[in-house]
């Protein structure tokens, strides 16, 4: 859906005759912004422990109180077997691995990075940021 919107915008830019980039002004509506920005649930629809769907107190399902701390970011190290990179390799290195990089995922924002570089479309991020500014 997002890609289709961007394709329409790009085609509009190409089709406009004798138009210069500085003369073109694009307007993104509230409904366009709603499709571009990431959905986040309203506080009244998120899970609330010890409450039923109507907000009434209920007995907890857990018999023992245990707390699990979920990290804010998840890191995944990427590596390849050394033997897969070379035709002829030293057999002593058959279990060696070569580090390729690291993927980092920020749970709160939903952003993903590879070796510190964000894995996203910069233009789409700029549009989404402007949408969040105009339509909080």
Image (cartoon, rainbow, N blue to C red):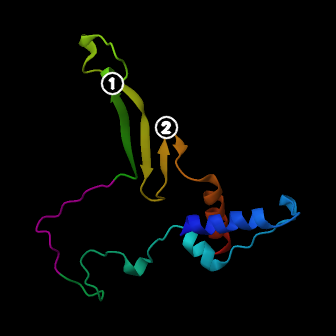
Provide residue 14's location: percent of width, then percent of height. Answer: 76, 62
124 sits left or right of 97 in the view: right
- Residue 136, visible in the rendered structure: no
| Nearer to me, 69 or 118 | 118
Residue located 51% across and 67% down the image? 38
- Please say if 8 is above or below 92: below
121 sits left or right of 28 in the view: left
43 sits left or right of 82 in the view: right
Local secondary structure at mark 1 = helix
Q: How many marks?
A: 2
- Gap in angstroms between the C-alphas marked 1 and 2: 22 Å
The label number, if any, that marks residue 84 in the structure image: 1
- Please say if 46 is above or below 96: below
| Dominant secondary structure of the residues highlighted in magenta in the image | loop
- Please say if 27 is above or below 19: below
Q: Dot 1, crowdedness within 10 Å: few (<14), some or many (≥20)?
A: few
Residue 6 lies in what quarter of the image? Answer: bottom right
Provide residue 110's location: percent of width, then percent of height. Answer: 46, 58
Residue located 64% across and 75% down the image? 135
Residue wearing tag 2: 115
Q: Are marks 1 and 2 in contact (CB under 8 Å)?
A: no
Local secondary structure at mark 2 = loop
Residue located 33% across and 13% down the image? 88
Q: Is residue 64 magenta?
A: yes
Name the quadrant of the C terminus. Answer: bottom right
- Residue 5, visible in the rendered structure: yes
Sequence-wise first label, 1 or 2: 1
Q: Is residue 127 magenta?
A: no
100 sits left or right of 66 in the view: right
Provide residue 112's location: percent of width, then percent of height. Answer: 47, 50
Query: Which region of the structure is painted magenta?
Result: 59-70
């Amino acid at each position: 859906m997002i890609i289709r919107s961007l394709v329409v915008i790009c085609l509009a830019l190409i089709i406009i005759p004798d138009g210069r980039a500085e003369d073109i002004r694009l307007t993104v509506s509230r409904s366009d912004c709603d499709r571009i920005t990431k959905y986040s649930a309203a506080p009244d629809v998120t899970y609330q422990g010890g409450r039923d769907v109507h907000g009434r107190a209920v007995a907890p399902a857990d018999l023992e109180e245990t707390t699990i701390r979920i990290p804010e970011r998840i890191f995944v190290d990427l590596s390849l077997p050394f033997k897969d990179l070379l035709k002829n390799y030293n057999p002593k290195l058959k279990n060696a691995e070569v580090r390729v990089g690291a993927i980092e995922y920020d749970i709160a924002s939903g952003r993903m990075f590879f070796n510190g570089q964000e894995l996203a479309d910069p233009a789409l991020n700029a549009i989404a940021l402007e949408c969040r500014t105009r339509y909080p």
